[in-house]
Image: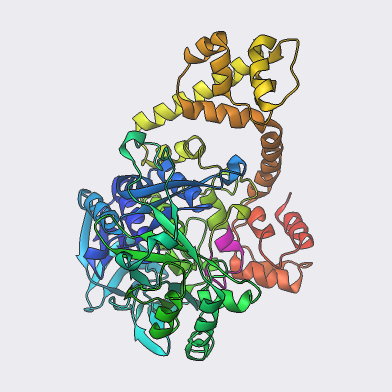
Amino acid sequence: MYDIIVAGAGHAGCEAALAVSRMGCSCLLVSSDLTAIARMSCNPAIGGVAKGQITREIDALGGEMAKAIDATGIQYRMLNMSKGPAMHSPRAQADKTLYSLYMRRVIEKEKNIDLLQDTVTGIDSSSEVFRGVILSSGRIISGRAAILTCGTFLNGLIHIGMNHYHGGRTIAEPPVHGLTESLVNLGFSSGRLKTGTPPRIDARSVDYSLVEEQKGDEVPVVFSFRTRPALTRNRISCFVTKTTPDTHEILKKGFDRSPLFTGKVKGTGPRYCPSIEDKICRFPDKLSHHIFLEPEGIDTNEMYVNGFSTSLPEDIQLEGLQSIPGLRDVKIIRPGYAIEYDYFFPYQVTRSLETKNIENLYFAGQINGTSGYEEAAAQGLIAGINAALKLQHRSPLHLKRSDAYIGVLIDDLITKETNEPYRMFTSSAEHRLFLRHDNADIRLHTFGHSSGLLDRETFTAINNKISCIEMLKELCLTSKLSSSEINPIFIKLGYPIVNSPQNTSALLKRPGIYLHMLLETSSSLKNAVHSITEDASIFEQVDIDLKYHGYLNRDRMMTDKIIRLESHQIPSSFKYDSVSGLSNEGREKLIKHRPDTIGQASRILGVSPSDISVLMIRLGR
């Protein structure tokens, strides 16, 4: 008998198992291949737009992903630096082999985790309560709770041209049969999705004189708030090239053998990460598409062709690649392919990611219809925390949309129709100015500490950081700089010179002026600031808080209004059929989703404002 059984050792399963173990519960982690723990089956990178923010949030809650990429990263870049701070997103290339080894070492050090190489093919339950998992051998292992993190393994089918193979995550891995059918028999509704991956090529066959080198940032920014920056460094370059009109014509020759266009693929693919053949069809006027060549590690010649995801026949893949500048003599190590797999509509889980049909059974990752390592890891972490909290008879962790991108992710899953792979974007978060990567520790450290994943030392350090930020903001609000201290900066930036002292906080509201610049010109301000702290990350927080003070205040006011709606709980036994005045569509969607709060109900597609008014009257304002 285990406290919690985790099925699947991908990015969701790893975070779930580690959270469960570190919160004091016994855990069995079941995987069909223990050499593939946290395997990067697609791109060898962590982070990116919105995904970098999620990785930082995982770290702030006490998860492992950020530390893993800091330990195995080989190139670091901060994206969108030409835009405002809400859009800045860290991304890092990983040595994919070292990343997997790192995560296995971390898991094996946890005394509360047992590993088992096997496959979960069914769920054993009684009276709608989870009792155990059924393995491929027929053996039943008992547990108090389970978290299913099955990735793309459920009835997985791989397509390369008109050839089709049963596979789980890669061609070499078997799919999982039986688990979908077991869950459907328990009353769950499933769907079918598709994702894809590009070919891998031999880096020695690239002509580097014809491609553009893309180096990492001069000063790498780490992912974990607990990593010392000196431990990270850039070790490789990536490269950029692009397709040509000839490439497009070559690829079109294979469309009659494409599983996408011949109807062999039934699942819906990701809208925002289309295959190269999809791009050619959807954007016929575009003469070229960028192709990014990304090394998969330090000690390998394998290279990932980002932007060339495809399921076209292998001969067409090779001919198309060889028409791209720099790839005339390219050699394919592994062809690109598409994979179809089963998922379960996420309206069937609650905010804690516990399923509504079976108590103590949780879903996390691509089984909920998401895509991406970061989205999966975030769900695994939340499911692990909540499963442990429930067994410990403690209140669940529910992150709001205003708390974290993770809160946005889960809220979107359970309230919106997920008919295609869900991917997180900054545009999905209405509070993105506050939900930045740089303040994830400030936003979420209390949640991590209260759940038991963030140690007292780290918690205290973050509270001290918050105190320093507040003291510096107060100092800026009350201090002034003389015109002789200000004008050298104004002249350099093209501002009219001034003849009187200026308030420090007012100066920091001006574009292009930052606290570190004022410290260089004013010794008195420098001494006052350094008596509080010399931490550059704290200076950054002060800059952002003061520059965007008005916008942040407006966002907090909007958040307060939304929280009032979230505070209106809807009983799980509430009978929508008995409420007169609801629209037919609204009633149908409310019965289907069974939202926890009025706020959640208001975000369900098909539930109108008048439906919400009727609900509030019935429940009592």
> Nearest the camera: 611 or 535?
535
In reply to whether residue 189 is colored magenta, the answer given is no
Query: Relative to residue 163, is residue 570 depicted above or below?
Result: above
* Place of residue 467 in the rendered image (x, y in percent of width and height, measured from the top left): 50, 22
Q: Quadrant of residue 17?
A: bottom left
State the extent of the magenta-drawn residues as a range: 412-422
> Nearest the camera: 139 or 338?
338
In reply to whether residue 420 is colored magenta, the answer given is yes
* Place of residue 191 in the rendered image (x, y in percent of width and height, measured from the top left): 50, 78
Q: Is residue 527 visible?
A: yes
> Nearest the camera: 407 or 261?
261
Q: Residue at x 41, y 83 (%)?
A: 159
Indicate left or right for 502 with 319 as reference: right
Query: Relative to residue 220, is residue 484 depicted above or below?
Result: above
Indicate left or right for 16 with 107 as reference: right
Indicate left or right for 14 with 285 as reference: left
Q: Is residue 360 visible?
A: no
Disc count in the image?
Answer: 0
Indicate the quadrant containing the N terminus: top left, top right, bottom left or bottom right.
bottom left
- The chosen color scheme is rainbow
Query: Relative to residue 156, is residue 373 depicted above or below?
Result: above
Q: Residue at x 66, y 63 (%)?
A: 604
Q: Residue at x 50, y 34 (%)?
A: 442
* Place of residue 10 in the rendered image (x, y in percent of width and height, measured from the top left): 34, 62
> Nearest the camera: 114 or 512?
512
- The prevailing secondary structure element of the residues shown in magenta is loop
* Place of residue 592 in the rendered image (x, y in percent of width and height, measured from the top left): 60, 70
Q: Residue at x 35, y 70 (%)?
A: 200
Q: Residue furthest front?
A: 209
